[in-house]
Image (spheres, rainbow, N blue to C red):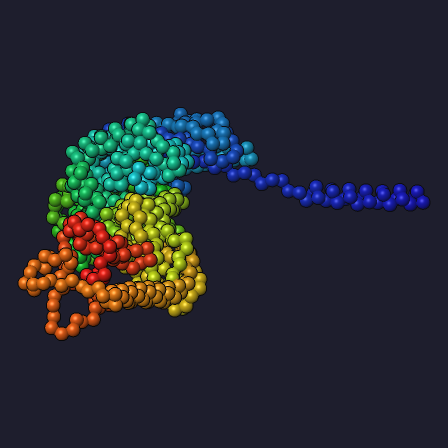
Amino acid sequence: MLAGRAKFVAAVVAVLACVGGLLTATTKPAAAQTPRVQVQLDSLTPYATNSTKTLRITGRVTNTGDIPLSTVNAMLWFDGTPLTNRDQLNAAAAETPGERLGTRLDEPWSLVDEVAPTLRPRATAKFTLNVPMSRIGLHAAGVYVVGVDIRATSPDSQMRETWRARSFLPYVPSGTKMTPVEVAFVLPVVDRPRLVEGDVLQGATGVNDAGETPSLSEFAPNGRLSELIDLGAKHDLSFAVDPALLDEARRMSDGFTTSAGTRINSAATTDVRNWLSRARGVLGAGDTLMLPYADPDLPALQRYRLSDRFTQAVQAADQTSDQFHAAGTLAWPGSGYADAGTLETIAASKARTVLLSQNALPGLPKDGSSPVASLATPEGAVTALVSDPTLTAGGPAGQTSPASIQQRFLSETALLAMQQNPASDPPTSDLRRVVATLPRTWDPGPSGETLFNTVESTSWLRSLSVGALLSQAPTAYGGPLRPSTADRKAELDPDVVDHLRQLSATSTTLLDMLAEPERSRPGLDRGFLRGASTAWRQNPTEAIALIDTMDERVQQAITRVEVVPPRLVTLSSQSGRFPVTIWNRGTEPALVRLEVRPSDPSALKIAPIEPIRVDRNRKATVSVTAETSTGGAVQMEARLTTRSGTAFGPTQSFPVRVTGYGQVGWVVIWIGLGLILLAASTRIFKRVRGAMSGQNADTETGTETARPADPKAPAGSGGAPARASRDGPDPEPTSEATTEPTTEPRAEGTAEPKAASNGHVTTPEESGTSEESGEPGGHDTPPGPPDHDMTKAKR
């Protein structure tokens, strides 16, 4: 039994061992990691002549991979075949390093730079190459493709691997015929918008490590914005300035608040104040054009039918031009491409100058004879400043370092100066003029000034201002407008456009509820333009964050106008009024409509309510008229709408109770008045009857009324009041209480009738006094027994 178990265990162990061995045998080693290296050229001999002795190239190599590299060396590479026209140069600029065959100088070893024995991951090392021109052997005028090969060994391979960087070198031997080329540089001074409203800027703190707030360091003496201003002032360049940047700098100069509530005091914005003061002087004295406010992405806005605010952008630019003494406004659609609709929008905005790419006007000569063109639109002609994009394109392979831009610029202008047969027939001028526009995001850096120093020292180049260029007669252009697929793909992200639509709708609602919308419209339009800036083409996430923050602020302004309903309303009749309060806690007067409606429309009918104006920080009470044919409780809803009927804010509910007490109350009141009149009549009747009974009693006891002996005697000569004698029997006495009230005027000093507590008028008799005595202004008759003479009865 035990022997059988032992055999079974041994068999299981043997099977597991076989499976383990199989798994071990089938496991493959980890794949070798691929080394990655980035090579950048920092400087290059600008151009070579017969007297040039050495070609010098400097740069950096960075190990961007995860494995170290060993034996890192740098070697010169060149192609001995010259490029003799600009088309060949453009084709070479589109190549990837390694496609073109050439010569690598690795002998003698003294020409090789031993960069580093080991280059660790994320480490950078510099290299310098100094190669005698005699070793290269350039022989004809033109542009040569030159560059650097970086060779190194990775731990996983014994083979040497190569990484490349390429550039261009103009060669102008003595005797080469060159036509001078005048160049007008356009230097953009723009940045990503950060303003939310007032002095509130997007971001959580004053630190810009995460790119969330305006970078105060860019305004510092060595910052990008400061270097642009200083560079333009030193070399008389033409500025293209975004007015939104100047506006934000002004708001930041005395301190600002981030959108998260962090306060940045004025001590931290000293560099901003200094930059703004410097910019004001330089821009006013130099050749300056203002871009439309926030430099909006007009092609994208045109495509999505959101270009209605572009006129406001141009108007803001015109205002800033006056403040900074600029030459005018320059529209710059995207990277310089515009269709007929975009040009019409520009012309309609009264911006008469537009910066276009030469590639957008394929029918225009490229020989430097037509740097300014005139284009007709239904809204009038616009003047196009035609920029040659190849001058500052850099390359090859899209490299945009200052050294790459410099070498491409020199190579393009050298071939243009060498060109002997201009495309225009006959040539309009022997002078070639071109416009070179630097990228919006261009950072001069430490070597940025080299380009302009080189231009000033190059024999075939001359500097020219944009203002001087625009003063020449433009070339009439009626040819086609070429679109750019790359430019269209680079437009604002569709998600950004969706958020812009939401901001636009919210702003429209706010304007529609304001009593004076034109006061707030410019600020809201500028907020929209900041969200539509061309600067957001490469930063959609940050654009959406700014747009959403602005939209939230506008919504808060809308909710500051609210309805305050009554707690309980009781209607005592079939129709009545009740108050509803509107409270404007905002900073602008509002003009809104109040909508009050019952939950059951058949239970209560509300009369129309006219729009109500409510001044800022004030309340207004609206008297609402309601009518019903039934009683009971009705739930009401009150809300506010704009003048055009767009509802905003929460809907408030309150109850209305209809009791029907009014009809019953009026019946009770009339019955009460009838009873009062009946009681008064009964009382008067009894008094009159009592008086008559007393007179009859006097007659039966032999008492007669005294009469005067002489009818001609005065009425007061006897001891008793006089009565007029009549022929015939005396009339029956009557009471004046049953007659209409007298209309004779009351004597001066006579007392007004007094209202008793039961609602009827108190007469003089009831008060114990007569009109002849008891009140100031009456006769001084001594008190005596009541006079029963009915001729003196008073009402």
Q: Quadrant of the C terminus?
A: bottom left
Q: Residue at x 29, y 65 (%)?
A: 690
Q: Is residue 636 left or right of residue 346?
A: right
Depicted 322 relative to depicted 55: above or below: below
The quadrant holding residue 276 is top left
The answer to which of 94 and 774 lies nearer the viewer is 774
The front one of 76 and 484 is 484
Residue 425: tell me if it is visible.
no
Q: Quadrant of residue 166?
A: top left
Evaluate whether residue 679 shows in this view: yes
Q: Position of residue 403 (x, y in %)?
A: 31, 34
Q: Which residue is farthest right?
A: 1
Q: Is residue 360 left or right of residue 727?
A: right
Q: Residue furthest bottom?
A: 728
The residue sitting at 18% across, 59% down in the picture is 378
Residue 692, position as x, y percentages in the image:
26, 67
